[in-house]
Amino acid sequence: MSKTIATTALISGGGPAGLMLGLLLAKAGVDVTVLEKHKDFLRDFRGDTIHPSTMQTMSELGLLDAFLKLPHQAVPSLTARFGREIIHLADFSRLKVPAPFIAMMPQWEFLNFLAERARAYPNFRLLMRTEATSLIRSNGKISGVNARGSDGEFEIHAELVVAADGRGSVLREAAGLELEDKGAPIDVLWFRLSRQAEDSGQVQARFDTGRVFIALNRGDYWQCAFVIGKGRNEAIRAAGLAAFRDSLKPLISFAAPRAEEIQSWDDVKLLSVQVNRLKSWWLPGFLCIGDAAHAMSPVGGVGVNLAVQDAVAAANILAGQLREKRPGASLALAAVQKRRDWPTRMTQRMQLMVQNTILARTLAAKGELRPPLALRIIMAIPGLRRLPARILGLGVRPEHVSKDLLSQLSAIRHIGHPRRS
């Protein structure tokens, strides 16, 4: 190895979970290093929905006003068309939060924002073009990682290693943690269509016999999702691009001719839907959060926000201990899983219910389609009608930056740290 780095907290993965945790730990005075394998964040992410729960966290950190200056489209409510009927699914404007809407924002904007704020702390290090390749074990615990950067391979030693490197986590696999697959009957084809000034600004959700189509307003284009049965991608492609475009046109009546903008299959990306979670999120010296701990279905677009909630919970529980290097790390890591496991399970249970009772049934439907009975009952009862907005917008159990952590942030605000290279 050409060099060795020592840090208190090493976070592998510069996504929403990794950068939010890095920012919170850095603000709390913890020496933290984040690894991101790409050279920048300018990639075509699909997780571009920022829910009210995440913006409430930004508000608690005093960052919401600056955050909302970034390019975004506000979605105050959600509706869906089932056959000929329109259902009003969720009205976020009634939530008692600082930002009662979903913000459609390119994920690179969100990640750059978090990275810029974290870099203001000299005890924070973000290493781009650097990835963790394996774990280092010593004295019965994980004590660091082997990493590869633009200058070659090196070691990083840490009190805590956090895997926030996504659903294909290299470190999770290296740790040998067991993953429970909950199954998914659907996949999603993603593509873009241009958006014109006269188009509606709201989310377009269309459930028709045998087909499901969703379009998200991204300013000058629609980010489109065409839901298909699990494993149907090859058959759809074999039928030809013209047949695929023709199947879209009845669903995008507001812009049917724009289906011709799909010029090749290179314009259509497959998202293989996964729903899974770890039985144990941790080992001594090691913790998984975000997609590395639980891959979420795209139903509700809540993946980014679950990842942020994991980061907030982990920071609340671990920041003081890491800063002061107190013993008892395993108990604290178990506490992070205990805090976040139930919300994860409940959210996945609801996603699986939607996948199995609405999406899969719509794809298999024959004849005229109507909204599911359970959905019609919820929408008909005022007390129940508020639940979808709360569950989608805030989650099953939203996390708040703890008073203890906020007091830590205030106490160290004027404490200097030596600059590092």
Image (cartoon, rainbow, N blue to C red):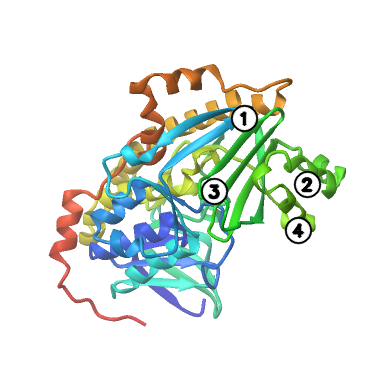
Give the camera-side residue of 292 and 47. Answer: 47
Decide which of tag 1 and tag 3 comes sooner along the chain.
Answer: 3
Q: CA distance from mark 1 to mark 4?
A: 25 Å
Q: Position of residue 340 (x, y in %)?
A: 36, 39
Q: Which residue is mark 4?
A: 266
Decide which of tag 2 and tag 1 comes sooner along the chain.
Answer: 2
Q: CA distance from mark 2 to mark 4?
A: 14 Å
Give the camera-side residue of 255 and 227. Answer: 255
Q: Is residue 143 visible?
A: no
Q: CA distance from mark 1 to mark 3?
A: 24 Å
Q: Which residue is mark 3?
A: 200
Residue drawn at (40%, 61%) of the image: 19
Q: In the rendered view, does 305 fall on the left or right side of 130?
A: left
Q: CA distance from mark 2 to mark 3?
A: 21 Å
Q: Position of residue 92 (x, y in %)?
A: 37, 40
Q: CA distance from mark 2 to mark 1?
A: 21 Å
Q: Disc 2 marks which amino acid?
A: Arg
Decide which of tag 4 and tag 3 comes sooner along the chain.
Answer: 3
Q: Disc 4 marks which amino acid?
A: Asp
Callout in the foreground (4, 3): 3
Answer yes or no: do the residues labelled 2 and 1 have beta carbons within 8 Å? no
Give the camera-side residue of 111 and 333. Answer: 111
Decide which of tag 2 and tag 3 comes sooner along the chain.
Answer: 3
Q: Quadrant of the C terminus?
A: bottom left
Q: Disc 3 marks which amino acid?
A: Ser
Q: In the displayed structure, would residue 18 be above or below residue 247? A: below
Query: How many neighbours does mark 3 have within 10 angstroms: few (below 14), some (14-19), or many (20 or more)?
Result: few
Q: Secondary structure at mark 2?
A: helix
Callout in the foreground (2, 3): 3
- Picture disc at residue 359: 1
